[in-house]
Image (cartoon, rainbow, N blue to C red):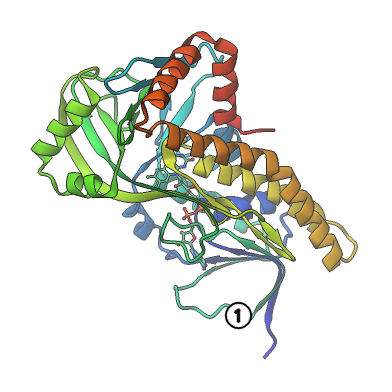
Amino acid sequence: MKAESCDILIQGGGPVGLACAAWCLQKFPDANITLLDRNSSDDADLAAADSRGIALSHGSKLLLDTINAWPTECADIHQVHVSQAGRFGRALMTREELKQDALGHIIRYRDIHLTLRKALKALQSKSSHFVWRHIDAHADIGGIEAKCIVHAEGGLFKKQDWVESGRDYQQSALVGLIEVENAAPHQAWERFTSEGPLAVLPSHYGPHILNLVWCGSPETSQARLQLSDVDFLKNLQSEFGSRIGRFLKIQDRRLYELGLNYRKEITQANEVWIGNAAQTLHPVAGQGLNLGLRDAYLLAEKLSALFSKAEAISTIDIHKMLDEYALSRKADRTTTIGLTDLMARVFTSKLVPIILARGLALSALQWLSPVKTALARQMMFGRR
Ligand SMILES: Cc1cc2nc3c(=O)[nH]c(=O)nc-3n(C[C@H](O)[C@H](O)[C@H](O)COP(=O)(O)OP(=O)(O)OC[C@H]3O[C@@H](n4cnc5c(N)ncnc54)[C@H](O)[C@@H]3O)c2cc1C
């Protein structure tokens, strides 16, 4: 039997794999791509899945707009208040000082996933060489020959079948939806506690329903997961304070283990790794998917430029293209991974000099406008 073949094989139908396929087809509709997707073909299965709120930057919005993949249900962030529990030092960032419509947007993971599927289906109807195969976890995919293999298998920290460079922060994130008394619309709060960051972010459900991301040691987080709603809200209130009034309700609590796992080399021969398959980050700076989407966009640019050429493409051409891609991602990856790792470590340190330094850093951030703007721009658009 003749082996199945394609030019580009994308393994992984999460947001990053879908976005990469969509940008390739948008730039070159004739591209010969096979996408292997472990998720069911039925959107209803995803609609019931992961509802955690993800912060997407304005840069990601601009990228997703190019393929009509911006979800309608989203909450804009107009200001971010950063502080540390029980210590001095705070910073406020506003959209006015950065001259942006929004500092970021909060969207449920499943809505990003579903909107990207819809965008890809629209492009598929005009692309006769695109194959979207839904497979189960045990499917044998050894028979597919591809000129270039894109790994977008993603995954969560400690759930991946590869471990390279990184760090186990000994932290988990407890996420959920909370109802509060007095939240100002479009306001995000990031509070650094002795155990990890506690973020309260807007949601599309309205100003009183907010997304919670509460990081702590695995043991404490597990205990918080088991608490009754009343005790959970009491603990949360005492950690967060009364800035947004009383915490009234909590729903949909889930736990995620947190750490850093990244590949030093993101290409090898004709293979390339993007998104969480290349780097899995702590969510403290909300950068994982933003960085993954930039990976996907820049790779799609290179792939479509190469495969749309009329002449035959050699192995050397593919290796050269992937080397150029890896070089073009170096600065953005290094900066985003480094900044996120620094924040995850510095803001959880219990060492007194570091506690003092981070208070000073937050205060300085408040007054040093160019530093604040540069940091916010890195978070919004990545390093160019
Ligand atoms: C608590 C938490 C909060 C977060 N908050 C933010 C945030 O605010 N902002 C932000 O930018 N990022 C955030 N992230 C990170 C973000 O969720 C990830 O970076 C993003 O989901 C990566 O997308 P991906 O497509 O690379 O991987 P995934 O989302 O993991 O998707 C990979 C897909 O590939 C499929 N798959 C796996 N193996 C195979 C295979 N062999 N063949 C075919 N398919 C396969 C899987 O089923 C899955 O659907 C957060 C993460 C966590 C845990």
- Relative height, residue 163 to residue 285 (above, below): below
Q: Residue at x 55, y 15 (%)?
A: 98
- Relative height, residue 309 to residue 347 (above, below): below
Q: Is residue 315 visible?
A: yes
Q: Quadrant of the C terminus?
A: top right
Q: Which residue is mark 1?
A: 142
Q: Residue at x 62, y 42 (%)?
A: 333
Secondary structure under tag 1 reads loop
Of residue 279 and residue 106, the one placed in the foreground of this image is: 279
Left/right placement of residue 5 relative to residue 82 reads right
Q: Quadrant of residue 231?
A: top left
Label 1 neighbour load within 10 Å: few <14, some 14-19, many 20+: few
Residue 51 percent across, percent down from the top left: 34, 46
Q: Quadrant of the N terminus?
A: bottom right
Of residue 267 and residue 219, the one placed in the foreground of this image is: 219
- Relative height, residue 115 to residue 384 (above, below): below
Residue 176 percent across, percent down from the top left: 26, 41
